[in-house]
Amino acid sequence: MRPGAHTAAHRTLPFGTLVEVQNLRNGRTVVVRINDRGPFAKGRVIDLARGAANEIGMVGSGTASVRLSVVDDKGTRAPAMCG
């Protein structure tokens, strides 16, 4: 992943999927494109590139509780399957 990019790794979502990630602590959101597999640490569902993590205010903490929504080409959001 490019550090400043708005990209992310997810175990099962197809590459190229757009996902809105909301930090539940502060409500900030970012839209990222899935371009990698992971994370492989237990209990984690998505790994954001540093630029995306910075945008939602989670660089300092390193982890955050988030809500994922898949964004389709019309901008419609639906909850993402996180398994």
Image (spheres, rainbow, N blue to C red):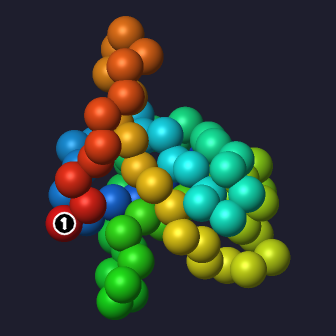
Could you tell me residue 66's position as x and y percent? 51, 61
The answer to whether residue 32 of the structure is visible from this angle is yes
Q: In this view, does 66 lie above or below 68?
A: below
Could you tell me residue 42's position as x and y percent? 34, 89
Q: In which quarter of the image is the C terminus?
A: bottom left
Q: Is residue 40 above or below residue 28?
A: below
Could you tell me residue 80's position as x and y percent? 28, 47
- How many callouts does the rendering have? 1
Q: 37 and 73: which one is in front?
A: 73
Residue at 70% from the left image edge and 47% from the top image edge: 28
Q: 80 and 53: which one is in front?
A: 80
Q: Name the residue under label 1.
A: 83
Could you tell me residue 40's position as x and y percent? 33, 82
Instruction: Please name the amino acid that badge 1 sits on.
Output: Gly
Residue at 40% from the left image edge and 34% from the top image edge: 18
Q: 48 and 25: which one is in front?
A: 25
* Residue at the bottom extreme, as displayed: 42
Residue at 67% from the left image edge and 59% from the top image edge: 53
SS for tag 1?
A: loop
Q: Is residue 24 above or below residue 18?
A: below
The answer to whether residue 49 of the structure is visible from this angle is no
Q: Quadrant of residue 48?
A: bottom right
Q: Quadrant of residue 5?
A: top right
Residue at 60% from the left image edge and 72% from the top image edge: 64
Q: 67 and 9: which one is in front?
A: 67
Question: Alpha-carbon neighbours of circle 1 within 10 Å: few (<14), some, or many (≥20)?
Answer: few
